[in-house]
Image: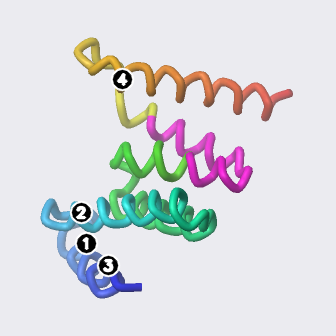
Amino acid sequence: MALEPAQALVKSSNNKQNGMLPRQFAWLVRAYCEESEAKLQVNDDKEGALESARAACHLSKNTNAQSLTVLLATACQSINDANGESQALKAYFDLKEDDPNMPRNEANRRRSLGFRLQKLEREASG
């Protein structure tokens, strides 16, 4: 993978930064997010998309909303991994709180994700 040298640099930097991802490496998280999305949309490479989404989540320490929702949850849903999808959505809702000034399309997406999480929880308990 072309991103491996950059990921190695992030890992060595993490050791010096108490596990925090330095701001200058946020591009790497975005690159993994974009790679995951491309694998899902263009190649229909579900396993590859999941791997890239997990890499983005891992590097961002689950602090990147895009990697948690659009990618990890979508990738898990594409391979019928309800547990993985549910965990990703729970992490997303733990990360982001409702904001009354949130744009309408983001609020609608958040509401849809909430309904999806409720459905997954009902299916898991029933």
Residue farthest along the top direction in this orientation: 100
Structural crowding at the residue carrying mark 3, measured as other residues with C-alpha within 10 Å and reported as few (<14), some (14–19) or many (≥20): some
- Disc ID at residue 14: 1
Alpha-carbon span between mark 4 and mark 1: 35 Å
Q: Nearer the viewer, mark 3 or mark 2?
A: 3
Q: Which residue is mark 4?
A: 105
Residue 28 position in % (x across, y down): 27, 68
Q: Which residue is mark 2?
A: 21
Q: Which residue is mark 3?
A: 7
Where, by quadrant of the figure, is residue 120 drawn?
Answer: top right
Residue 38 position in % (x across, y down): 45, 62
Q: Nearer the viewer, mark 3 or mark 1?
A: 3
Q: Nearer the viewer, mark 4 or mark 1?
A: 4
Residue 84 position in % (x across, y down): 64, 50
Alpha-carbon span between mark 2 and mark 1: 6 Å
Asked if labels 2 and 3 touch by Cβ distance under 8 angstroms, the answer is: no
Say left or right for 22 vs 53. Answer: left
Q: Secondary structure at mark 2?
A: loop
Residue type at the position of mark 1: Asn
Q: Based on the picture, tell me whether residue 91 belongs to the magenta stretch.
A: yes
Residue farthest along the right direction in this orientation: 126
Q: Which residues are magenta?
A: 74-92
Q: Secondary structure at mark 4?
A: helix
- Numbered circles on residues, count: 4
Asked if labels 1 and 2 touch by Cβ distance under 8 angstroms, the answer is: yes
Quarter of the image with the N terminus in it: bottom left
Mark 4 or mark 3: whose residue is earlier in sequence: 3
Alpha-carbon span between mark 4 and mark 3: 33 Å
Residue type at the position of mark 4: Asn
Mark 4 or mark 2: whose residue is earlier in sequence: 2
What residue sits 27% from the left and 21% below the top? 103
Where, by quadrant of the figure, is residue 87 drawn?
Answer: top right
